[in-house]
Amino acid sequence: MKKVLALGLLSVMVSSPAWALFETNKQLVETAQITLEEAVHRALKSVPGKAVEVEIGKEDGRTVYEVEIVDSNKKTQKVYVDAQSGQTKMDK
């Protein structure tokens, strides 16, 4: 009986559209007006150094690139670049 209940619960979870709440990176990139390369370029204008990692995601309902930069003092800083407007924001 427990097996049937577990299979029933699993089938409901798999068929549920809850996964549709999350956009894939491909979908986020397709809707972005700013390319990954442009986002890195803009981030490096804000914080000179070397970009070591870039991710795309959602923040406050907006698509943003999160660019991690190692500056000349060997300190890691994150710069967020809006994928629509190109505006940059430093991580606090």
Image: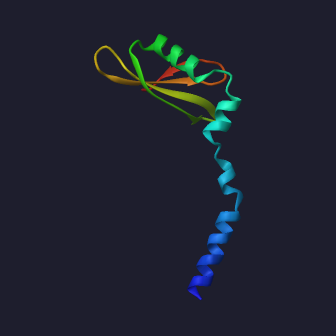
Number of marks in picture: 0
Q: Quadrant of the N terminus?
A: bottom right
Left or right of 74, for residue 25 = right
Q: Position of residue 44 (x, y in %)?
A: 46, 14
Work out which quarter of the rendered image holds the C terminus and state it.
top left
Quadrant hosting residue 68? top left
Q: Position of residue 32 (x, y in %)?
A: 67, 27
> Residue 18 lies in what quarter of the image?
bottom right
Q: Residue at x 63, y 25 (%)?
A: 83
- Its colouring scheme is rainbow
**Residue farthest along the left direction in this orientation:** 73
Could you say where residue 74 lies in the image, as x and y percent from the top left? 29, 20
Q: Where 28 falls versus 85 (above or below)?
A: below
Q: Residue 14 appears in which quarter of the rendering?
A: bottom right
Residue 82 % position (x, y):
60, 24
- At x 61%, y 18%, the residue is 86
For the residue pair 46 and 32, the one nearer the viewer reads as 32
Q: Is residue 53 left or right of residue 64?
A: left
User: Residue at 54% across / 18% down in the picture?
Assistant: 88
User: Quick check: 66 left or right of 69?
Assistant: right
Q: Residue extending furthest bottom? A: 1
Identify the residue at image location x=51%, y=19%.
40
